[in-house]
Amino acid sequence: MSNLSSKPDSSNSGSQEALLPEDFFKKHVPAEISAAKLEFFCAMIPLDALTDVMIDAFPKEADSADAITKDANDREDIQSCTSAEELVRLMRRLIGLRTMAFFLKRLLAREEEITSILKEKLLRNKNDALTDNMVSFFIRCKKDPSDWIREAYPSIENLYVRSMLCLILGFRGNAGDAAFLMEQYFWFLKNAPDTDYQLEQGPLVGLFTLNGRFRRDGSAYQPPKLPYFDVERPRAQKILPGGMLRRQR
């Protein structure tokens, strides 16, 4: 595993070409449904609009009696938290669609404390809900977590956490991270194929996102529309509230 670089490739300096080869995403198409794709979808929505959009996108998951009751209980539990430690403990829980934005706002309001606790817990974390909630937090927090991800990545034990950290680098990293994300994509394809977690999708969607943010010379770039993802109408099958997939056993 190579070290992560935070610098663009100087050999391509001055190039205005796309960060990745034009046909890369034709050969490597992101999965129709994955946890990484759902996190991408959520990250594209302004926080204040997240509740309405998610309820509209996933009405069956949001409107059941059980879901409405759970949302009310979650909100009460979140409101009762008086410390960052208590909030992080709640991150180990699947949070309902109506409560996601409220929870994220509470987490982001204590960003420095939450970040410090998460950095320690993620080294050995095996809780999927904590991982998914961590993604939403690090994509939206003010301080860029990329340097910590690059430094801590080799010490992360859980492969699902590693995969989703690659997704975060796609949103928060720079053009120089493309080589590492590419390496991780092919590593997951080779070493963790056909798993319910679709681990290769974290770095692949990360690459897709990075490709939409930068040109090859490292200059910022934002295309008018990101292809391959239907942000307006995501597929809800097999998806549970809180960013989790219903994994078939």
Image (cartoon, rainbow, N blue to C red):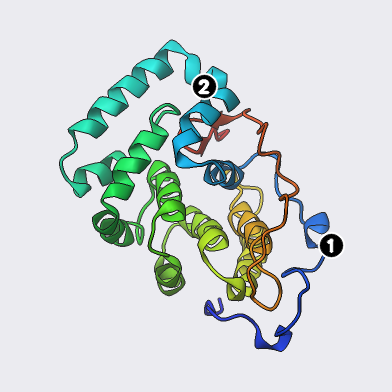
Going by the numbered disc 2, the residue's amino acid type is Glu
Residue 235 is situated, as x and y percent measured from the top left of the image, at 66, 31
Residue at 40% across, 15% down:
66
Which residue is disc 1 drawn over? 23
Instruction: Let me know if residue 92 appears in the view.
Output: no
- Residue 27, image x, y percentages: 82, 57
Closer to the chain start, of discs 1 and 2, is 1
Image x and y of residue 58, in percent? 57, 25
- Report the side of 30 relative to 137 (left or right): right
Q: Mark 2 points at which residue?
A: 61
Given residues 144 and 154, the one toward you in this image is: 144
Task: Give the residue drawn at x 53%, y 30%.
Answer: 54
Q: Residues within 10 Å of mark 2 (few under 14, many from 20)?
A: many
Name which residue type carries label 1: Asp
Q: Which residue is at a point 26% across and 33% down the rendered structure image?
A: 78
Question: Which of 239/141 is in front?
Answer: 141
Label 1 secondary element: loop
The x and y percentages for residue 60 are 55, 18
Q: On the rendered structure, is 209 left or right of 126?
A: right
Residue 146 sits above or below residue 82 on the image: below
Q: What's the distance in space between the residues labelled 1 and 2, CA to CA?
A: 36 Å
Question: Based on the displayed image, in which of its 4 quarters is residue 170 positioned?
Answer: bottom right
Please tell me how crowded label 1 is: few (under 14), some (14-19), or many (20+) other residues with Cα within 10 Å. few
Q: What residue is shown at x 49% (from left), y 21% (from top)?
A: 62
Q: In this view, does 125 lie above or below 243?
A: below
